[in-house]
Image (cartoon, grey):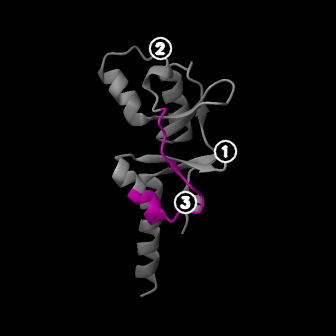
Amino acid sequence: MFVRDAMTKPILVVGPEHTLRQAAQLMAARRVGSAIVMDPDGAGVGILTERDLLYAIGAGKDPDVEVTNGHITWEVVYARPDWSLEEAAMAMSRGGFRHLVVLDEDEVLGIISVRDIMRVWAQRRAEAAASV
């Protein structure tokens, strides 16, 4: 199975001007642990994760005032849609990430997370056990 088969799509996009609360509410509504952050002109791509939100709140930031811009990871590690899930897991492990942005050419296609990979692997195990 490939990254394109397990990634979360469509992507949730927030702007760097969104407050932390707005971003958290959007992520909760979509039941996702991360959002792609794009500049209004669509040029810059970053990622905001639930962990980023927790760190900001834990540091005493006001979620109704603080904007996402100061809490975004701009140095994003990308996965390709044709990578195996094992390749994505290895990239996450090497970099200490739980999410990778899936990029094909210059187009952001989705996000692959540890949760996505574990879901697929758990399904595989269940199917294998059922076939025995």
Give the residue furthest to the bottom. 132
Residue plotted at (50% across, 42% down): 32
Seen in the picture, residue 20 relative to 50 is either above or below; the reply is above
Residue drawn 30% across the image and 19% down it: 59
Amino acid of disc 2: Asp
Q: Please tell me how crowded label 3 is: few (under 14), some (14-19), or many (20+) other residues with Cα within 10 Å.
A: many
- Residue placed furthest toward the top: 65
Q: Nearer the viewer, residue 45 or 60?
A: 45
Which residue matches tag 2? 64
Image location of residue 36, percent across then percent down: 56, 36
Q: Could you tell me the amino acid type at mark 3?
A: Val
- Spatial CA span between label 3 and label 1: 17 Å
User: In the rendering, at what x and y percent does residue 21 appear?
Assistant: 48, 22
Quadrant position of residue 132:
bottom left
Give the distance between the C-alpha atoms of the residues marked 2 and 3, in whole angstroms.
Answer: 35 Å
Disc on res. 16: none
**Chain part drawn in magenta:** 74-90
Proximity of marks 2 and 3: CB atoms separated by less than 8 Å = no
The image shows residue 87, relative to residue 41, as above or below, that is below
Q: Does the stretch in magenta take in 88?
A: yes
Which amino acid, mark 1? Answer: Asp
Q: Residues within 10 Å of mark 1 (few under 14, many from 20)?
A: few
93 relative to 76 in the view: left or right: left
Name the N-terminal-most of marks 2 and 3.
3
- Label 2 SS: loop
Q: Which residue is mark 3?
A: 3
Q: Residue at left 47%, top 14%?
A: 64
* Residue 22 among magenta residues: no
- Which comes before the other along the chain, label 3 or label 1? 3
- In the picture of the structure, the residue carrying the numbered disc 1 is 106
Marks 2,1: beta carbons within 8 A: no
Position of the N terminus, as image quadrant, is bottom right
